[in-house]
Image (spheres, coloured by chain):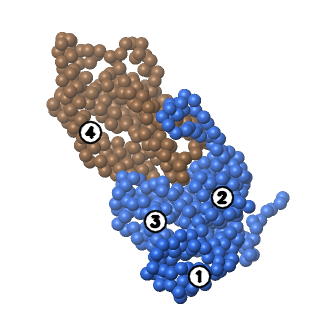
């Protein structure tokens, strides 16, 4: 485990450099939590309904806080990092080392996520619970949520790495990255719960991996699936991880054959 | 069954081969366009591709314990060759055998045994001090704590980078980063080391220290080095044998001393005077440029020895400074290439 630990330490050290960034991130997310609260309070107030699309106001606020937390936990820089390393040719400096680049990156990212989680999520949960009435749904749900969020971390890394591999064939990857981020924030349920969509779209999403990264772990916490439903979803997460990893190793080998590391 | 032994060297002992490159060829596709905004739009729709041959039928060998110089002008294919030998580039055809491995097929197993510097490409994590990168490499190469400390301290001392390793890498100068890159390449005591322009941006004192360190390592550990550089003095200080490559093909493979005898027929002298100088004429010397206090001469070594030129200058002029330089490597290559 010492390699993995070493990579995680690097991630922590790199993340710890940007103190100001972190402060800004905390403030911005607290502000958006406040805005979200005001918006939905108004919506619930005008509609006169206590429950919209299966959510009470408190549940929706809880949903928002948790989706922020899961997003922080699962976020990865692999698309940006790999595409930049390919374009500048600096990927070879990593290839000349006896490491699997993606495996290293996962653990590096794991470290930086850990630090981010501590610094950023704790104030979020405290303020969410104390000011905005975030719900505690019990220890069983918390445990199931933790397992599901852990799998979501691996799944999002695998999915992002899969997308990132396209950079081997397209020199500029900014466009793809933005498009992916936009799609992701809707398809994963980051902006609002997928239950707000019509049935047809919900069906479509269930065949895609995105919802298993944010929507499903958060719903698990809210106790929407029950224990067996939650475990079933974890199985689907694992299946997606296996599919994506198989595809990645196949594409990676092909990419290596054509990669020329331009520039010097 | 036929057993083939490696060729014996002059001392009669078996000399192992560190690198064997055979008929290596690498072509890749790139697109081109003319300058200008209109052309930029045009290339969005109709892209012209061309196939570039970076390496063509390259074959050579390097013995274990050798320091081999790999030289050639910009774009000659040196770096491509290094990349292929490091296992980071699939060749179009041909074979490479390094330390008994086929680099790009057994990459992870193979690169454990090698160290690489890719010119100015950073080997260090950018936002944190270099020492953190070294610590990580200790885990990557599974270097025992004791060896790690010993080697690191030695390199820090030789390269004079005690404080440099504790500063975030992005705040370092190119030369300082290059020294740290070198540490990255050598920390795990590799058997085979590729240095692609290891002294780029490095000051004279550090250059000398780096060269001495390479020589020491070569002598003590029998480490094999392949070095590319545009600094002739690197080559002269380190390598007995050189391979010259131009336009993707090997144009010379042999001893450095031979090539110098054969191709370097002139030297350049830059003389500075402490007072306006009188007219300079000497058989075998050609004046390239001059003003009151300075003179640049090309001495033809077939006609005159360099010692005679300096003696003549010191005797007859008030000389403040003399710099003697070989013609640049590109000129030597041009000479060879003309043949």
**Which residue ends up furthest to the top in the rendered image?**
A48
Question: Quick one: SS at disc 4?
Answer: helix
- Shown in blue, the chain is B
Q: Which residue is mark 2?
A: B245
User: Marks 4 and 3, how far apart in space?
Assistant: 40 Å
Q: Which residue is mark 1?
A: B309
User: Marks 1 and 3, how far apart in space?
Assistant: 31 Å
- Which color was chain A given? brown
Task: Mark 4: give few (<14), some (14-19) or many (20+) Cα within 10 Å.
Answer: some
**Nearer to us in this view, A57 or A259:** A259
Q: Please indicate whether residue A155 sits to the left or right of residue A139 in the image.
A: right
Q: Which residue is mark 4?
A: A25
**Which residue ends up furthest to the front in the rendered image?**
B279
Q: Chain of mark 3?
A: B
Question: Quick one: SS at disc 3?
Answer: loop
Q: Which residue is mark 3?
A: B202
Find residue B325 and report its horizontal and vertical position in percent.
Answer: 56, 72
Find residue B178 and report its horizontal and vertical position in percent.
Answer: 46, 61
Question: Quick one: SS at disc 2?
Answer: strand
Q: Are the residues at dot 2 and dot 4 in contact (C-beta closer than 8 Å)?
A: no
Above or below, A197 against A227 in this view is above
User: Marks 2 and 3, how far apart in space?
Assistant: 24 Å
Of callouts 1 and 3, the N-terminal one: 3
Above or below, B266 against A37 in this view is below
**Do the residues at pointers 4 and 3 share their chain?**
no
**For the point 42% across and 60% down, which residue is it?**
B174
């Amino acid at each position: 485990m010492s390699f993995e630990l070493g990579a995680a330490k690097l991630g922590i050290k790199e993340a710890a450099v940007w103190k100001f960034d972190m402060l800004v991130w905390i403030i911005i997310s607290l502000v958006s939590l406040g805005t979200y609260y005001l918006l939905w309070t108004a919506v619930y107030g005008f509609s006169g309904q206590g429950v919209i699309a299966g959510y009470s106001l408190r549940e929706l606020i809880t949903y928002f806080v948790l989706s922020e937390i899961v997003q922080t936990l699962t976020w990865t820089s692999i698309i940006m990092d790999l595409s930049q390393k390919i374009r500048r040719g600096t990927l070879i400096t990593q290839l000349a080392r006896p490491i699997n680049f993606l495996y290293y990156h996962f653990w590096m990212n794991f470290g930086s996520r850990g630090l981010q989680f501590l610094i950023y999520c704790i104030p979020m949960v405290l303020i969410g619970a104390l000011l905005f009435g975030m719900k505690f749904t019990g220890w069983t749900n918390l445990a199931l949520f933790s397992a599901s969020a852990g799998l979501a971390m691996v799944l999002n890394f695998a999915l992002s790495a899969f997308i990132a591999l396209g950079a081997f064939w397209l020199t500029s990857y900014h466009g793809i990255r933005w498009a992916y981020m936009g799609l992701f924030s809707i398809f994963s349920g980051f902006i609002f719960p997928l239950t707000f969509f019509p049935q047809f779209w919900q069906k479509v999403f269930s065949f895609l991996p995105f919802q298993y990264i944010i929507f499903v772990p958060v719903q698990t916490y809210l106790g929407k699936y029950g224990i067996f439903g939650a475990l079933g979803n974890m199985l689907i997460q694992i299946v997606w991880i296996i599919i994506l990893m198989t595809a990645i190793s196949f594409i990676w080998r092909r990419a290596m054959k054509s990669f020329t590391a331009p520039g010097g | 069954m036929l057993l083939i032994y490696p060729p014996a060297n002059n001392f009669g002992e078996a000399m192992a081969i560190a690198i064997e490159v055979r008929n290596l060829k690498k072509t890749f596709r790139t697109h081109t366009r003319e300058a200008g905004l209109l052309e930029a739009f045009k290339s969005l729709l109709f892209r012209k591709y061309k196939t570039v041959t970076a390496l063509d039928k390259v074959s050579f060998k390097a013995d274990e314990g050798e320091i081999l110089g790999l030289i050639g002008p910009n774009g000659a294919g040196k770096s491509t060759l290094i990349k292929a030998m490091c296992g980071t580039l699939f060749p179009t055809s041909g074979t490479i055998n390094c330390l008994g491995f086929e680099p790009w097929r057994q990459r992870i197993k193979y690169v454990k045994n090698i160290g690489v510097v890719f010119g100015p490409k950073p080997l260090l994590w950018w936002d944190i001090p270099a020492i953190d990168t070294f610590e990580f490499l200790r885990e990557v190469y599974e270097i025992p704590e004791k060896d790690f400390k010993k080697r690191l301290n030695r390199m820090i001392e030789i390269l004079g980078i005690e404080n440099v390793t504790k500063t975030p890498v992005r705040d370092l100068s190119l030369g300082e980063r290059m020294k740290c890159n070198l540490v990255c390449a050598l920390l795990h005591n590799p058997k085979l080391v590729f240095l692609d322009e290891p002294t780029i941006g490095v000051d004279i004192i550090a250059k000398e220290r780096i060269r001495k360190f390479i020589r020491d390592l070569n002598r003590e550990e029998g480490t094999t080095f392949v070095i590319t550089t545009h600094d002739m003095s690197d080559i002269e200080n380190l390598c007995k044998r050189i391979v010259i490559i131009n336009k993707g093909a090997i144009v010379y493979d042999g001893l450095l001393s031979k090539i110098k005898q054969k191709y370097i027929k002139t030297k350049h002298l830059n003389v500075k005077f402490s007072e306006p100088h009188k007219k300079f004429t000497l058989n075998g010397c050609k004046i390239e440029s001059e003003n009151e206090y300075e003179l640049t001469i090309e001495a033809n070594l077939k006609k005159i020895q360099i010692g005679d030129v300096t003696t003549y200058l010191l005797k007859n002029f008030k000389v403040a400074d003399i710099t003697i330089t070989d013609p640049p490597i590109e000129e030597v290559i041009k000479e060879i290439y003309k043949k």
